[in-house]
Amino acid sequence: MKAPRARLLHHRKASATDITGFSPSIAFAGGGIISTAGDVSSFYRGLFGGKLLPPELLKQMMTTVTGVGGVQYGLGLVRRTVPCGTAWGLDGNFPGYLVQSYAKADAERQATIALNLDPNSMSKKAIAATTALFDDAFCG
């Protein structure tokens, strides 16, 4: 079954806010690395393509525990259920930014989306649209 196409949400035009004086280093590992969506995708392609770790270490990363809300956490990875199976990766967010990057364990399928929005103030409709966008990109 094909995932539904994400619909674009129409928002009223808001003015931009200068946050250059606000350091993401206050948020755990946020600000610890500067990368593009392509850089993040390359990392996961290498990780699941067997170029970064021996299989036994990747298997340890993929051994999960259940966290808040039923989220399956491994060592630096999250197990995400998508319409076409299981995806492994991580979400990253900070006021003004949202990145979701996941891959299949066999590296055959991968998607990374990077959005300029504030995930802390997203409506349920915007969250659903973002989820549909990712699912469509990953499973499409």
Image (cartoon, grey):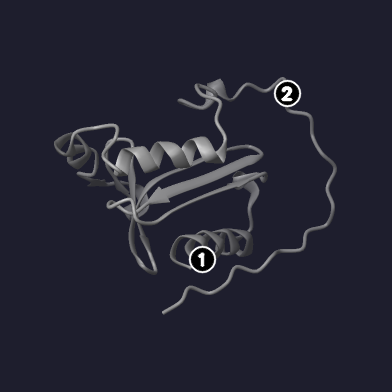
Give the alpha-carbon distance from disc 1 to disc 2, as whole Å.
Answer: 33 Å
Describe residue 125's horizontal placement relative to residue 60 as left or right.
right
Q: Is residue 45 left or right of residue 25?
A: left
Q: Residue at x 27, y 36 (%)?
A: 75
Q: Which comes before the other along the chain, label 1 or label 2?
A: 2
On the picture, is 84 further left or further right than 14? left
Q: Residues within 10 Å of mark 1 (few under 14, many from 20)?
A: some
Instruction: Compare residues 55 and 30 and report the one nearer the observer.
Output: 55
Q: Quadrant of the N terminus?
A: bottom left
| Residue 50: numbered disc | none
- For image coordinates 59% across by 63% down, the residue present is 129
Three-letter code for the amino acid on which mark 1 is drawn: Asp
Decide: is 11 above or below 20: below
Q: Which residue is mark 1?
A: 136
Q: Which residue is more in the foreground, 19 or 109?
A: 109
Q: Position of residue 90 (x, y in %)?
A: 41, 43
Graded by Cα atoms within 10 Å as few (under 14), some (14 to 19) or many (20 or more), the crowding at tag 2 reads few
Q: Which of pointers 1 and 2 indicates the residue nearer the eye?
A: 1
In the rendered image, which quarter is residue 36 located in?
top right
Left or right of 137 on screen, residue 116 = right
Depth check: 73 or 35 in front?
35
- SS class of the residue under badge 1? helix
Image quadrant where residue 12 sits: bottom right
Expressed as whole percent of the image width and height from the top left, the position of residue 106 reads 28, 52
Residue 115, horizontal then vertical, whole percent: 63, 47
Residue 117: x and y, percent? 67, 46
Q: Amino acid at mark 2?
A: Thr
Q: Is residue 123 above or below residue 7?
A: above
Outermost residue, bottom side: 1
Say above or below: 24 vs 70: above
Q: Residue 20: which disc?
A: 2
